[in-house]
Image: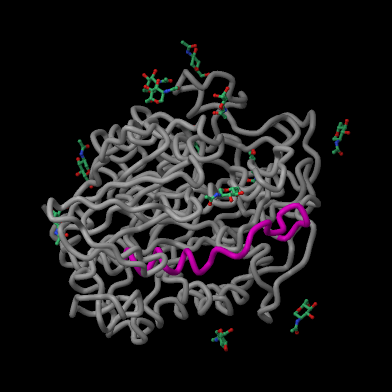
Amino acid sequence: MKYSLTTGAAAVALLGFAPSSPTDFALGNGSSPSCDTSSRVYCGGNWEGVVSKLDYIQDMGFDAIWISPIVQNVEGSTTEGEAYHGYWPQNINSLNSNFGSADDLKNLSTSLHDRGMYLMVDVVVNHVVANPTNTTNVSPETFDYSLLQPFGSQSSFHTQCFISDYNNQTNVEQCWLGDYGLPLLDLDTENSTTVDTMYTWIKDLVQSYGVDGLRIDTAKHIRQDFWPGFVSSAGVYSVGEILIGNVTYAAPYTDVLDSVLDYPTYYAVYDAFTNGTSGNMSAIAEMVTQAQDQYNHSLFYAGSFIENQDNPRIQSTVTDQAVSLEIRSCLDWSSKIAMTWPFINDGIPILYYGQEQGYAGGNDPNNLSGSPASTPITNPSSPHVTTLNTARKQAIASNSSFLTTSLKFISQSDSSALAVSKPPMLTLLTNAGNSSYGMYSGGETVVDVLTCNTYTAGSDGSLSVKTSGGEPMVLMPATALSEKGTLCASVAKGTGSDGQGSSSKSGAERLEVGRMVVLGRFWEG
Ligand SMILES: *[C@@H]1O[C@H](CO)[C@@H](O)[C@H](O)[C@H]1NC(C)=O
Ligand SMILES: *[C@@H]1O[C@H](CO)[C@@H](O)[C@H](O)[C@H]1NC(C)=O
Ligand SMILES: *[C@@H]1O[C@H](CO)[C@@H](O)[C@H](O)[C@H]1NC(C)=O
Ligand SMILES: *[C@@H]1O[C@H](CO)[C@@H](O)[C@H](O)[C@H]1NC(C)=O
Ligand SMILES: *[C@@H]1O[C@H](CO)[C@@H](O)[C@H](O)[C@H]1NC(C)=O
Ligand SMILES: *[C@@H]1O[C@H](CO)[C@@H](O)[C@H](O)[C@H]1NC(C)=O
Ligand SMILES: *[C@@H]1O[C@H](CO)[C@@H](O)[C@H](O)[C@H]1NC(C)=O
Ligand SMILES: *[C@@H]1O[C@H](CO)[C@@H](O)[C@H](O)[C@H]1NC(C)=O
Ligand SMILES: *[C@@H]1O[C@H](CO)[C@@H](O)[C@H](O)[C@H]1NC(C)=O
Ligand SMILES: *[C@@H]1O[C@H](CO)[C@@H](O)[C@H](O)[C@H]1NC(C)=O
Ligand SMILES: *[C@@H]1O[C@H](CO)[C@@H](O)[C@H](O)[C@H]1NC(C)=O
Ligand SMILES: *[C@@H]1O[C@H](CO)[C@@H](O)[C@H](O)[C@H]1NC(C)=O
């Protein structure tokens, strides 16, 4: 078995990543660290600790993890605390010893592969950080370049200027992120020596640690034609961070990377579900349709998410309001419904760790877990996540076109409703709370896989259902569910296998083979 997300895309493409930052995920002995993330320091978590949590992640139905950048970062405290997140590289040829040793990382990789899971690593190519301490008023001439391995001299970097005009792409690519207090030295990715260094580095990194995929940080800060060579050197799936709510801007990056993290849809979904009935549901349909039309490979390889390390968690936005109990419970369903989104659409579902527990961290650095401010405000949603992953696996198993057919929106007269058709799944979402909605067509027994309640379509093929207490519904025909499966088996009418069966932890017995064939053809064609 070749552990590559491009040749084995289906495994990850469908079931999603469970990203985890070793910084605050788990200590080597499996305990969860307790530290105040507002102090912006390393919390003690490490790669060994992630190994101890793989059962937990896999049991929710995920088959890949995405971990923080692995290379050595600036040491000590800066004007913005320690480099606990890994986004301030200093020596790209050394590992970040705060997260463990090379053997620990290889062990994580091997542990994942042994259970048929994949490793996606976050990489930073755009910049490095020079000084270990306060750099205010320190000019580029005085930086200690010897720390910046393997670059080592000022000539490897763009001339210092901080980004001042996001409408000027040259400015975005060649000026620097950060500020005088913490300048992020912008690598001269027009310099062929630097380019070759980066291409060789990524090839070695992927091979040394058995990496299956890359999440590429700040990808829009490097010229687009840098990326094809980088991606082909890596030889694995690559998804770029293009942090912007504009499909037209993001789309060209899907020609040079395998895909992008789908921020345009993220913003639309976030806004639609965090503003009561004022949220604009048709803006979601508009954005998704644009992305389907403009992204290379449509949305099939895009990362689909509703939380990450750079944005406030969805439940923090809702708690920021002075909420009464009534509104609070109203907002609980809102975040649960929004959480449903990444699992029922065309992209690769990505779950940010802690989301499944209802963490509510807000602005930096509270959107990381561990601080009092990010204590869950709802009951854990992990059963919801597990169910959604299982439903998606069964949808794939029951329809070989599921992965490669774009979802369609079914227009609604009610502006608070969104109906998503991705056969055999039909999903109803609403931001209106516990109102009633009805529509379906099928002519057979239909199961809400979140409750296992069944519904029978009328003779004209129509179906009226009423949501219960504003809860989301994910409807699938009973024939698409397996009698031998773990999902609503008692009402299932299908005889196929269940992707979530007890044998799913064995690589050899996994059910992804058929899906890989589908995706393999897609990639070749
Ligand atoms: C795990 O290690 C941490 C940090 O050294 C320690 O505080 C904790 O008690 C340990 N937990 C167990 C179960 O050994
Ligand atoms: C950094 O250095 C500058 C100039 O020496 C000083 O004004 C500033 O207070 C320092 N900042 C921190 C966070 O130490
Ligand atoms: C890999 O990690 C597992 C779980 O922490 C541990 O039992 C095992 O000894 C480690 N193996 C190596 C080679 O470090
Ligand atoms: C390109 O970068 C290398 C080091 O990476 C440096 O030696 C060389 O001077 C740079 N070339 C130019 C034209 O800046
Ligand atoms: C765009 O930014 C570059 C780099 O800062 C600058 O040289 C150029 O003048 C800018 N172009 C315009 C039109 O402002
Ligand atoms: C979106 O990006 C495109 C391409 O960069 C640009 O032409 C357009 O003005 C942007 N739209 C908005 C609303 O900023
Ligand atoms: C779409 O991506 C493929 C590689 O996956 C590439 O070969 C092709 O050129 C891209 N299409 C465009 C229009 O750039
Ligand atoms: C929420 O809805 C209100 C009322 O329509 C509107 O004024 C406000 O801009 C919306 N906020 C967001 C974040 O969309
Ligand atoms: C909702 O979004 C759609 C599509 O982007 C837009 O045409 C419409 O004007 C928006 N409605 C409101 C009330 O903002
Ligand atoms: C947390 O979210 C804010 C946006 O509210 C963002 O600016 C910040 O970078 C995030 N924190 C981290 C550690 O990424
Ligand atoms: C399978 O998916 C295709 C494409 O969406 C759809 O046309 C077909 O009706 C689906 N079949 C079933 C049994 O759901
Ligand atoms: C609707 O939700 C509100 C707020 O949670 C709750 O008080 C009310 O009982 C619910 N009504 C129905 C019919 O479920």
At horizontal 33% and vertical 35% (from top left) the residue drawn is 285
Of residue 29 and residue 69, the one placed in the foreground of this image is 29
Residue at x-position 23% and y-position 80%: 497
Q: Main secondary structure of the magenta part?
A: helix
Residue 121 seen in the current view: yes
Q: Is residue 460 left or right of residue 396?
A: left
Drawn side of residue 295 relative to residue 263, left or right: left
Magenta residues, as a range?
A: 370-392
Residue 367 position (above or below residue 28): above
Q: Quadrant of residue 206?
A: bottom left
Residue drawn at the location 64% of the way across and 57% of the way down: 359
Residue 372 counted in the magenta span: yes
> Which x, y percent locates residue 290?
29, 32
Picture layout, residue 11 above or below residue 346:
below
Please say if 46 is above or below 201.
below
- 306 and 308: which is toward the camera: 306
Residue 309 lies, in percent from the top left, at: 59, 49
Return the residue nearer the eye: 489 or 91: 489
**Residue drawn at the location 28% of the way across and 84% of the way down:** 508
Horizontal relation, residue 379 to residue 324: left or right: left
Q: Position of residue 189 (x, y in %)?
A: 45, 37
